Image (cartoon, grey):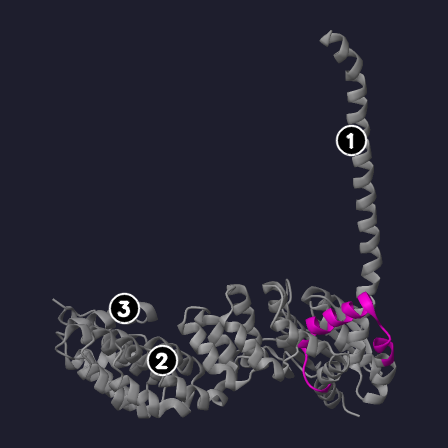
Amino acid sequence: MLDRVTQAVLPWALAGVLGASLALLVILVVVQLARRLRAGRRDPLVERGHALVIELLAVDSDEEAAGIRAELEALRGRNWEIVVDEAFRVMPKFEGAAVERLSSLLVERGVMESQLARLGRGSALGRARAAQNLGNARWAAAAQPIAGLLAHGDPDVRAVAVRALGQISDPSTAGAVIRAVARGGVHIGPAIEALEPMGDRISGEILSVLRDPLPEVRSVAVAVVGESRIRAALGTLHDLVVNDEDRDVRRLTALALGRIGDDTSVRYLVASTTADPALSVALAAIEALGQITTDEAMEVLCLFAMSDDPAVGMAAANVIADIPLVGLTTLRGLRVKAPRNVSIAAAYQRCVLASGADDPESDPQWRVA
Amino acid sequence: MPTILVADDDPDIRNLVATKLRRANYDVVTAVDGAEALQVLAKTHVDLGVLDIMMPGLSGLDVIREIRGQEGLADLPLILLTARAEEQDVERGFAAGATDYVTKPFSPRALLARIASRLGP
């Protein structure tokens, strides 16, 4: 009985499955064709949008721009969206009146306002996209709202925010960026990359951050000051390198003073080397002296190289060895003064090998026992 | 009208500079990389070149060195248009034989003024 039923139903069932599969295949083919057709239609639109943006950037005066603007202003819907995307994409490559003309068109069409609004609502991707667009446009009014995104839960949003703030280059956001790094929300590399171009313009903001109660914040701030070589902060750094309660802050401050390379820092670095209870700070100070390389700094380094403290002596001798041009001759002089100093001898030999110069100490009497 | 070579692998930069120059009544030839720039220079008379440094294959600096070694092109004004803005990059550019150095992002208007000043009235 069951066999008979199966025999009757099976062909119908197979035909049904086959029919459904065919129908599915047809649907897939149609969808693919429709997609390709749409893509084919979109390309010329993107091309035209791109051309209009480029033309608007290329004109010299508002009169010349009038025709292109009229064409752009007439665009609606998807066509206008393409132009907006193109505008934001190319903006970071150019500057001056051309970009201002493009920005003013976007302002008139309410694009900047809508991007600003998107910073505060919607998905993480949408917020990041808005921050990226406003950064590309270097839209000053967006600086503080974008700084607000530095506390966003999504690390990608925070990373985009830092980059956008760097593009906008508003010094008042420097403190927010530094605090975001200190909280662990943003990597220090991109933060320095964003802040460095602001140079001395962030000095006012940075001076207050250098006095932040949190040592993590002060650490990041001194690193930024060093990388950006902000001389206006030298007085504060001199105080921090000697007096800050946190060892890491003192160490990073010493390194920052080296990066800035100002002669007035020598005596503070000497104080750190000789009096700081932490060896890491003393070694950082020696490294910094090697970057200053003035006569005074070299004299001090030579004295440290001959120090009774082997760690200080070796660090100073190695730092001297790494100083281009004068390192070798300085160590040669030190070898004469202290022929039995192992640190100086080792650094000297390393320097000779690295420079490829003939070793004038091939005489056995020079060799270290 | 003077003919200007614009060599840049970024189509946005290439298109904009070319459009800007054509609007200013210059003839423009373009290249997408250093090798194509040399090919263009071999068969077209060019009065000035605008070259990106970081192009695939031959860089803008390679192109300049090659050009400076060629008879007839040794004095060709060559402007480097590049994202490399460090002091040593600028030094390297001039050492290679660049006539001028413009960093990106750049003002199209200012670039046109530099080109015009090199070509004279």
Q: CA distance from mark 3 to mark 2?
A: 37 Å
Where is residue A104 shown, x and y percent of the image? 74, 84
Q: Which residue is mark 1?
A: A21
Q: Amino acid at mark 3?
A: Arg
In this view, the residue farthest toward the top is: A1
Give the residues in magenta.
A70-97
Q: How many marks?
A: 3
Nearest the camera: B79 or A316?
A: A316
Instruction: Out of A360 and B51, give the one closest to the viewer.
Output: B51
* Residue at mark 1 to residue at mark 3: CA–CA distance: 76 Å
Under tag 1, what secondary structure? Answer: helix
Under circle 3, the secondary element is: helix
Residue for badge 3: A350
Dot 3 or dot 2: first in sequence order is: 2
Left or right: A359 with respect to A195? left
Q: Chain of mark 1?
A: A
Q: In which quadrant of the rendered view does residue A106 lie?
A: bottom right
Horizontal and vertical percent for residue B66? 65, 71
Q: Is B49 or A116 nearer to us in this picture? A: A116
